[in-house]
Every structure is written in C-alpha cells, then in structure tokens.
C-alpha cells in the first residue's frame, strides 16, 4: 500500500460527515457532530486546516465561509486503517484477524454467506493471477 492513512478519532468523525454530505462548512460539520461531541467552532476549523495540509480534504470559498470536501475516498481510508490494524494487532496475520472478528462479533447466517462468497471470489482472482 503506497500511502497509509491513520486518522485519529476526531479526524475520522469529520471525514464521515464529509463523505456523507459531499461537502460542508465548519459550522455544518460542527452541527453534524453534536450532540455527541461538544466542540468549539475553532477546534473544527483548526482540525480541517490540518487535514487539508495532509491532503485529506480541500476547500473552496463561499462568501465568508470555507466549504470543505473530502479528497480521499472512504474505501481507501478503510483499507489503509484495517491493514494497519491487522499489522499492529495480529502481525499481519489475516486469518487471526478474521478469526478474532468471527469470535467477537455477532455474525448472522446471511453475513457468513456473504463472507463465503467473498472468499470464493478471492480464490478465483488468485487462481487467474497465477
């Protein structure tokens, strides 16, 4: 993986707002995070500025307000963070990660069916890659 995207909890919460809405002002992000998070307008603004410096978001001016949008896709961040988690907690052992998830999470029959299908698809991909 070329770039690792390790987002802190607040950064990830802000990104979820932007991914959901497509774009938002600082005030809109702050409102979306309430009531779970009581944060100052300046805190959100500062965080978005730092995230822009990391090339996670970009902004455009709309009058006096800056409107932020995500630059990076949610799927890319998810892949990067899960790969990092697997490496740090399980030494990169994907089987150990999946076993842990199956043991610790309530998995329905439908979800198990989807997982089996994904495994079969991955097996086919690997077979054709040889």
Image (cartoon, rainbow, N blue to C red):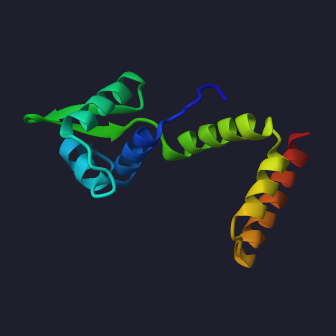
Q: Is residue 108 left or right of residue 119?
A: left
At 41% from the left edge and 35% from the top edge, which residue is drawn? 71
Q: Is residue 33 left or right of residue 28?
A: right
Residue farthest toward the top in the current orientation of the protein: 53
Q: Is residue 52 left or right of residue 113?
A: left
Q: Nearer the viewer, residue 127 or 96?
A: 96
Measured from the top left, where is residue 99 in percent x and y? 82, 56
Q: Is residue 31 left or right of residue 57?
A: left
At 40% from the left edge and 41% from the top edge, which residue is drawn? 10
Measured from the top left, where is residue 47 in percent x and y? 32, 32
Q: Is residue 92 above or below residue 120?
A: above
The answer, for residue 126, to whether it is visible in the render is yes
Measured from the top left, where is residue 51 in percent x and y? 37, 29
- The quadrant of the picture occupied by the C terminus is top right
- The quadrant of the picture occupied by the N terminus is top right
Q: Quadrant of residue 83?
A: top right
Q: Nearer the viewer, residue 52 or 107?
A: 107
Q: Quadrant of residue 116?
A: bottom right
The answer, for residue 121, to whether it is visible in the render is no
């Amino acid at each position: 993986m070329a770039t690792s995207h390790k987002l802190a909890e607040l950064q990830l919460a802000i990104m979820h707002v932007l991914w959901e809405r497509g774009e938002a002002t600082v005030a809109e992000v702050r409102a979306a995070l309430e009531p779970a998070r009581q944060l100052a307008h300046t805190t959100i603004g500062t965080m978005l500025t730092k995230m822009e410096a990391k090339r996670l978001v970009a902004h455009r001016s709309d009058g006096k307000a800056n409107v932020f949008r995500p630059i990076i896709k949610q799927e890319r961040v998810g892949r990067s963070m899960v790969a990092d988690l697997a490496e740090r907690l399980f030494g990169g052992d994907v089987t150990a990660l999946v076993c842990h998830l199956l043991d610790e999470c309530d998995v329905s029959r439908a979800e198990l069916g989807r997982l089996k299908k994904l495994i079969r698809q991955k097996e086919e991909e690997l077979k054709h890659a040889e």
